[in-house]
Amino acid sequence: MNNWKRIVVCQNMSILDAMKIIDSAGTQFVMVLGEDDTLEGVVTDGDVRRGILRDLPLSSPVKIIMNTQPRCLPNDISRTEISEFLHKNRISHVPLIDKDRRVTGVVSYDERVGITGHSSTAVLMVGGLGSRLGELTSNCPKPMLPIGGKPVLQILVENLKEHGFTDFVFCVNYRAEMIQAHFGDGSAMGIRVRYVEEPKRMGTAGALGLIPEDVSSPLLVMNGDIVTKVNFAKLMEFHSESQALATMAVRKYDFQIPFGVVKTEEGRITGIDEKPVHSFMVSAGIYVVEKESIKLIPENEFFDMPHFFESMMKDNKLTQAFPIHEYWLDIGREDDLIRAQREFSEDG
């Protein structure tokens, strides 16, 4: 990375400004440097998202979330050693430093190792009935509804391909023939598509028990009716860093009570909170799971993702939340479909 100084920040820069640099630079971290370019720490996209989970204000300085013992490599390391290090640690960028911890560069897959993409499989759940959309899905599966001239599922697949995914499994049920006719084996799009036909409605996790044994771990699993600009490469790296058995993408949902909430104590009014807003983290329908977790899914039963995560937690397995701040929209309701069509029209 020749222009590595564009991802350099100081300890007092705000988390929000660091986040903007991470997004614009296309890297997954920024370096916090001191005098003479000495490495004081790094702030990754994952560090930012963990800060969001801690409810830290984005105006806070990056020094409170930075990793002061980041992974880095000596600047005289060989190409082969770099390749092995990046593969072993499942990371895409790492600083190069000299004996005095001065940064001399940043190495990445693209520039020094020549590796692009990754081997993970994307499993897309596209068998739902879409009953909330009424007549719109009477003859068309929800993932094939058009937005900006393309089916929602095609937009999702193209986005995933841009983030390195080339192996896909579609879990189909309702109107499966329409999806299969459109995508075929995926070769026309430069990808591989295989199909798992659910013998019955099996829920958002039940169909995982039917996927081919040769899929690569970890698996990206998501609903096929989501329009989003989530950086899936960052999600995969976050999952790897956390060493979790499964990761769930979550988003903030605000709910406003439409009345004044009255606080009382023994019948006496002690306060009134006018139309308070409560915030929750809710599932975004996007997950990363290790293949070994699939053994927790019961055979031939309806099994949803919440039950899947609950079974892992009951088994004391580590599960992790990945907060998303990027654009996200579920087209499950007609109003949301119209909104997505309008927003894509405005973008185009």
Image (cartoon, rainbow, N blue to C red):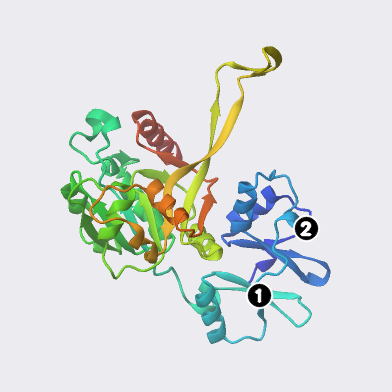
In x, y percent, where is residue 186?
25, 61
Looking at the rendering, which quadrant does residue 106 occupy? bottom right
Whether residue 1 is visible, yes or no, is no
Mark 2 residue type: Gln
Q: Which residue is mark 1?
A: 72
Please tell me which of labels 1 and 2 falls first in the chain: 2
**Residue drawn at x 20%, y 44% as measured from the top left:** 174
Disc 1 from disc 2: Cα separation: 19 Å
Residue at the right extreme of this rendering: 35
Query: Residue 207: where, in percent of width, then height?
Result: 27, 54
Seen in the image, is 155 located left or right of residue 127? right
User: Residue 144: percent from the left, percent from the top?
Assistant: 26, 43
Q: Residue at x 60, y 20 (%)?
A: 275
Quarter of the rendering occupied by the C terminus: top left
Residue beneath the point at 55% across and 65% down? 241
**Residue 140 higher or lower than 257, as above or below:** below
Q: Point out which mark residue 305 bears.
A: none
In-front residue for pair 95/128? 128
Give the quarter of the image for residue 193.
bottom left
Residue 113 in view here: yes
Dot 2 alpha-carbon crowd within 10 angstroms: few under 14, some 14 to 19, many 20 or more: some
Figure quadrant of the N terminus = bottom right
Q: Amino acid at mark 1?
A: Cys
Q: Which residue is mark 2?
A: 11
Q: Nearer the viewer, residue 48 or 146?
A: 48
* Residue 155 screen position, x and y as percent: 35, 49
Asked which secondary structure carries label 1, the reply is loop
- Other-residue count near label 1 (Cα within 10 Å), few / some / many at <14 / 14–19 / ≥20: some
